[in-house]
C-alpha cells in the first residue's frame, strides 16, 4: 500500500496499564464495536505490507498476546516483546529496537511507531505518513492534527520558519505551549539508526518522570536532522485514555461501520441508533430499524428487515427474514423466517426456512423444521420439531427434571394443542395431535391423538343453588 522499496517495521506500543480506565482489563483489550482496541490498530496496519510488526506488551501481556495470537489478521507478521517496567513510550520503543538489534542487527528499515491506544487511525493515513517519510527523506515524520480542544495531547512546537522543533507533553507545557492546538497524534515514522541513537539519549527529566518517545524529535532537530509533521484528519487521532474517550472512539468507529454498510446497500432508518459490530456482514437491501444491535460474528442475508429493538449476537439470519423486538443469540435462521415480537432465541437454535416464531416465544437448543409455526407464548428447550408442525399457544417442553435435561421430539406434520406440557423425554409421532391442556408424559404414536387431562363434567343448576345459599 505504501509502494516503498525500503523494508517497514511497525512498533505498536501497548504495554501501558491505562490507569485512567479504572479497569482490571488491560487498556488495549477494551472493545470498540465488538473488537479489541489493539486489533483495530493491527487491522489498520495490515494493508501497509509491513515486514514485521513488533507489539510491545507489558501490563496484562499474556492476555494481550492471547488475543493477538487468536484474532490478529493472519497475514500480519506479528511478534510480541515484553517491556518489563513501564518507564514511558521512549523506553517501550527501545525494547522493540533491542529486539530488532538482536534478530536483525544489519537490517535497514523505516520504523513506524504506533500508539496501541489509537483505534480510530486509518490505513490510508498511515500509508500517507510512510510515503511522505520515504519521499522527503526525513529522519522522523510525525503524524499531527489540529484539534479544537488539544487537552491531554503533546503539543507540536514550531520555530519562526514553521519548522518542527519539539513536542511538549501537556504536563510540561507553559501557558503559551498549552495554547497550541497542533498535537502529536502518537504515530511516527523514523529512520532506524537515527531513532536508535536518539532513544539512547532520552532522559526522564519531565513532570511524569518518564522517557518520552516524542523527545526524540528535539534530539534529532538539535543535531541538525530534518523532522516533518504530516497532518491527519482530526477524527483519526483520538487516543483512548479514559472510558469517556472509549465512548468517543466507539462512536467514530460506529459511524464508519454504518457508512460502509449503507454504501453497500443497507438501509438504516436511523444510523444514530443502529449498532453494528466490526465483524458483522450483511447482504443487499437489508433494512435496519432503530435500536438494532448486531453483534459478534453475525451475518444477515439479502432483503432482511431487522428491528426495531433487536439484539442479534453471533448468529446467521438467512435472506428475506424478519426479526422484530427480539433477542437472538448463537442461532441459525434459514431464509424467509419471521421472529417476534418479544421472542428470545437462545444458543443452539436452528430454524429452517419459512418458519414463524411469534409473540413471547423462547427457544433454546432446539431445531424447528421447514414451514413450522410457533405463533405465541411457548417455551421449547432441547427439542426437535419437524416440518409443518403447529405448536399451540402456551406449549411448554418440560425438559428439566431437576437434575438432567431431556429431549422432546415432535415429528413432521404434528399439531400440538394449546397449553400442552411435553414432559421429556417424549416423542409426538408424525401427524399426531395432542389435545389442548394435556400433560403428555408418554409417546404419542404416529397419526394418534394424545389426551392427558381430567375429563370435564358440568354440574346442572350449580350457580342458582350457590346464590340461594
Ligand atoms: C502520548 C504522547 C503524546 C500524544 C498522545 C497521543 C508520549 C510521552 N506522549 O501521550 O505526545 O499526544 O500519546 O495519543 O508518548 N506505553 C507503553 N509503555 C510505557 C508507556 C506507554 O507501551 O511505558 C504505551 C501505552 O500502552 C499507550 C501508548 O504507549 O498505548 C501511549 O502511552 P500513553 O501513556 O497513553 O501516552 P499519552 O499520555 O496518551
Ligand atoms: Ca494515550
Image: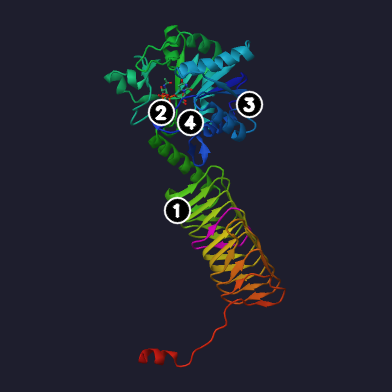
127 vs 292: above or below: above
- CA separation, marks 4 and 1? 30 Å
Establish whether ligand 1 lies closer than 8 Å to the Cβ of label 4: no
**Quick check: marks 2 and 3 in contact, CB under 8 Å?**
no
Residue at (53, 16) in percent of width and height: 95
Residue pointed to by mark 2: 19
Give the mark nearer the N terminus: 4 vs 3.
Answer: 4
Residue at (54, 32) in percent of width and height: 44
Q: Report if residue 337 lies within the magenta region.
A: yes
Residue at (45, 13) in percent of width and height: 216
Residue farthest to the front, as pictured: 469
Give the main secondary structure, helix, strand or loop, of the magenta stretch. loop
**Quick check: marks 4 and 2 in contact, CB under 8 Å?**
no
Residue farthest to the top, as pictured: 223
Residue pointed to by mark 1: 291
- CA separation, marks 4 and 2? 9 Å
Q: Helix, strand or loop at disc 1? A: loop
Q: Is residue 170 left or right of residue 351?
A: left
Residue 252 in view in this figure: yes
- CA separation, marks 2 and 1? 32 Å
Q: Helix, strand or loop at disc 2? A: helix
Which numbered mark, 4 or 1, is in the foreground of this view?
Answer: 4
Which numbered mark, 2 or 3, is in the foreground of this view?
Answer: 2
Q: Is residue 26 left or right of residue 454?
A: left
Q: Helix, strand or loop at disc 4? A: loop
Give the mark nearer the N terminus: 2 vs 3.
Answer: 2
Nearest the camera: 322 or 256?
322
The image quadrant that residue 61 belongs to is top right
* Span highlighted in magenta in the image: 333-347
Amino acid at each position: 500500500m505504501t509502494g516503498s522499496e525500503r523494508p517497514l517495521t511497525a512498533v505498536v506500543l501497548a504495554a501501558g496499564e491505562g490507569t485512567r480506565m479504572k479497569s482490571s482489563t488491560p487498556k488495549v483489550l477494551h472493545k470498540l464495536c465488538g473488537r479489541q482496541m489493539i486489533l483495530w490498530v493491527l487491522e489498520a496496519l495490515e494493508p501497509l505490507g509491513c515486514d514485521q510488526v513488533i507489539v510491545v506488551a507489558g501490563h496484562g501481556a499474556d492476555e494481550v498476546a492471547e488475543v493477538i495470537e487468536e484474532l490478529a489478521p493472519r497475514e500480519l507478521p506479528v511478534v510480541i516483546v515484553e517491556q518489563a517496567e513501564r518507564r514511558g513510550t521512549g523506553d517501550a520503543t527501545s525494547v522493540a529496537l533491542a529486539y530488532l538489534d538482536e534478530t536483525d542487527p544489519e537490517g535497514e528499515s523505516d520504523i513506524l511507531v504506533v500508539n496501541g491506544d489509537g483505534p480510530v487511525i486509518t490505513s490510508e493515513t498511515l500509508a500517507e505518513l510512510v510515503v511522505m517519510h520515504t519521499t522527503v527523506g526525513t529522519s522522523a515524520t510525525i503524524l499531527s492534527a489540529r484539534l479544537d480542544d488539544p487537552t491531554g495531547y503533546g503539543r507540536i512546537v514550531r520555530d519562526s520558519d514553521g519548522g518542527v522543533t519539539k513536542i511538549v507533553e501537556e504536563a510540561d507545557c507553559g501557558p503559551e505551549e498549552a495554547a497550541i492546538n497542533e498535537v502529536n497524534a502518537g504515530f511516527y515514522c523514523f529512520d532506524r539508526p537515527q531513532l536508535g541513537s536518539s532513544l539512547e539519549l532520552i532522559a526522564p527529566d519531565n513532570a511524569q518522570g518518564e522517557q518520552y518517545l516524542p523527545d526524540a524529535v528535539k534530539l534529532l532537530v538539535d543535531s541538525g536532522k530534518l523532522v516533518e509533521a504530516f497532518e491527519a484528519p482530526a477524527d483519526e487521532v483520538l487516543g483512548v485514555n479514559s472510558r469517556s474517550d472509549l465512548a468517543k472512539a466507539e462512536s467514530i468507529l460506529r459511524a464508519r461501520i454504518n457508512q460502509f454498510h449503507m454504501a453497500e446497500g443497507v438501509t438504516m432508518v436511523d444510523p444514530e441508533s443502529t449498532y453494528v459490530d466490526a465483524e458483522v456482514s450483511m447482504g443487499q437491501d437489508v433494512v435496519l430499524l432503530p435500536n438494532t444491535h448486531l453483534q459478534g460474528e453475525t451475518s444477515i442475508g439479502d432483503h432482511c428487515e431487522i428491528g426495531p429493538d433487536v439484539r442479534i449476537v453471533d448468529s446467521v439470519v438467512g435472506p428475506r427474514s424478519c426479526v422484530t423486538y427480539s433477542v437472538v443469540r448463537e442461532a441459525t435462521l434459514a431464509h424467509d423466517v419471521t421472529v417476534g415480537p418479544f421472542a428470545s432465541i437462545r444458543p443452539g437454535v436452528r430454524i429452517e426456512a419459512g418458519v414463524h416464531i411469534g409473540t413471547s416465544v423462547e427457544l433454546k437448543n432446539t431445531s424447528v423444521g421447514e414451514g413450522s409455526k410457533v405463533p405465541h407464548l411457548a417455551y421449547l428447550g432441547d427439542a426437535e420439531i419437524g416440518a409443518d408442525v403447529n405448536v399451540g399457544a402456551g406449549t411448554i417442553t418440560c425438559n428439566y427434571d431437576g437434575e438432567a435435561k431431556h429431549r422432546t421430539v415432535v415429528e413432521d406434520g404434528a399439531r400440538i394443542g394449546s397449553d400442552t406440557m411435553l414432559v421429556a423425554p417424549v416423542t409426538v409421532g408424525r401427524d399426531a395431535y395432542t389435545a389442548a391442556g394435556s400433560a403428555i408424559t408418554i409417546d404419542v404414536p404416529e397419526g394418534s391423538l394424545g389426551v392427558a387431562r381430567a375429563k370435564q363434567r358440568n354440574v346442572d343448576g350449580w350457580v342458582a343453588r350457590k346464590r340461594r345459599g
